[in-house]
Amino acid sequence: MLADKRILLIIGGGIAAYKALDLIRRLREHGARVTPVLTRAGEEFVTPLSVSALAAQKVYRDLFDLTDEAEMGHIELSRAADLVVVAPATADLMGKMASGLAGDLATTLLLATDKRVLIAPSMNVRMWEHPATQRNLAQLQADGVMVVGPGVGPMACGEFGPGRMAEVPEIVAAIGAALGDGPLKGRHVLVTSGPTHEPIDPVRYIANRSSGAQGAALAGALRDLGARVSFVTGPASVPAPMGVDVIAVETAQQMADAVAAALPADAAVFAAAVADWRVANAAGQKMKKDGTGRPPMLEFAENPDILARVAQMGEGRPRLVVGFAAETETVVDHATAKRARKGCDWIVANDVSPETGIMGGAENAVMLITDQGAESWPRLPKAEVARRLALRIADALA
Ligand code: CTP
């Protein structure tokens, strides 16, 4: 399952570093190519020679290895991989990753990479349970870092509890999942997300309050199931997930063009809050007060309805087209009518009345409208809504 996958393995300085040697062996048995990086602390636990012998590759040891940029620079090294794995991930490494430090080769690679990162934490139980480590863990997860383990059990230091590095077969399975060996493997899914900005003049625009959180979570959940995701996003306030193809746009027209260019897809999900109107007489220069006290008149033109276009495109239409509906009243009726009007397969409807706190918030309570009727989901974190929706999409495409 890992044939020819390139894995950059960062070995931190913990007693579990010896398991990294076995991990290298197992990964190579599965056909993966492992490029090892050993931190200074890691060298206290395993020797560079044993690491490079098992990997059958040069082991990279610190930034000075890379002064020979002719060989491979750190940016290239961090991007040539399909996946970056940190095992063991010590409390110190996790803290540095969470705060974006780049004082040595390992942390520089982690900051420079554009690939997904999987960590296998390993530390004493008190260190694992310390609020600082838990804070770092939460930050890393929010940044899209995947985590395998730690396990619970007796530890080398004599204590018992969570903190043991996950066992090698578990890490190998997590690497397989991270590399897209899920139910959406081989599928291409398009996701639109975020608001659009419609210019009034070069410095002013009309926008809306969408944060892009639900679209980003959904793109991440689809990626986790193995899909290749094209993520067409307006100027959102939450970052795009790692490991998806990001196409950044500003206006609805640009979003429509980007969507057309990203097709064909097996499924398309339209989570963006697209402006229905653009300013038809947007000024080429900054608009100035003319001294008369009369405000300028803005004329509006209708934007393309991207969802309706794709849902009704006939040949080349994705097998599954999903729209979102943000409503403030009679949600099911409006959303059911919207599903019919736009011609999409499903509508994910939510009540965005200010008192729900959903728009810009961390949770969502949705109704899924399909040809079978309306299904009401409980109020859940946006990441969980995303996970459930991604699983439904995987089912529909199976
Ligand atoms: N949408 C789109 N392109 C647009 C407008 C909307 O792709 N120009 C998509 C959104 O991404 C969302 C769905 O259509 O998936 C619902 O958008 P909404 O703005 O609620 O639909 P409207 O037709 O504008 O309906 P209403 O006027 O009731 O809000």
Image (cartoon, rainbow, N blue to C red):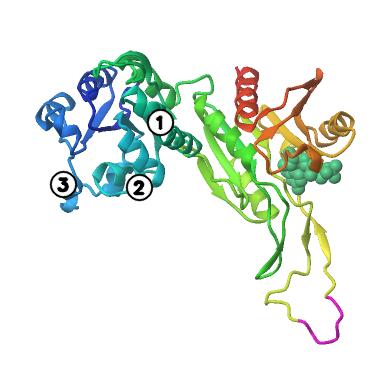
Sequence-first disc among 1 and 3: 3
Residue at (88, 34) in percent of width and height: 334
Q: Which contiguous range is marked in magenta?
A: 289-295
Q: Is 393 in front, or is 170?
A: 170
Sequence-first disc among 1 and 2: 2
Give the residue type at disc 3.
Asp
Q: Which mark is residue 65?
A: 3
| Residue 163 rendering spot, x and y as whole percentages | 35, 21
Give the residue type at disc 1.
His
Q: On the image, which quarter does residue 350 sit in?
A: top right
The residue most toward the left is 49
Sequence-first disc among 3 and 2: 3
The residue indicated by pointer 1 is 130
Asked which secondary structure carries label 3, the reply is helix
- Asked if 61 appears above or below 126 in the picture, the reply is below
Mark 1 or 2, which is nearer the eye? 1
Asked which secondary structure carries label 1, the reply is loop
Q: Residues within 10 Å of mark 3 (few under 14, many from 20)?
A: some
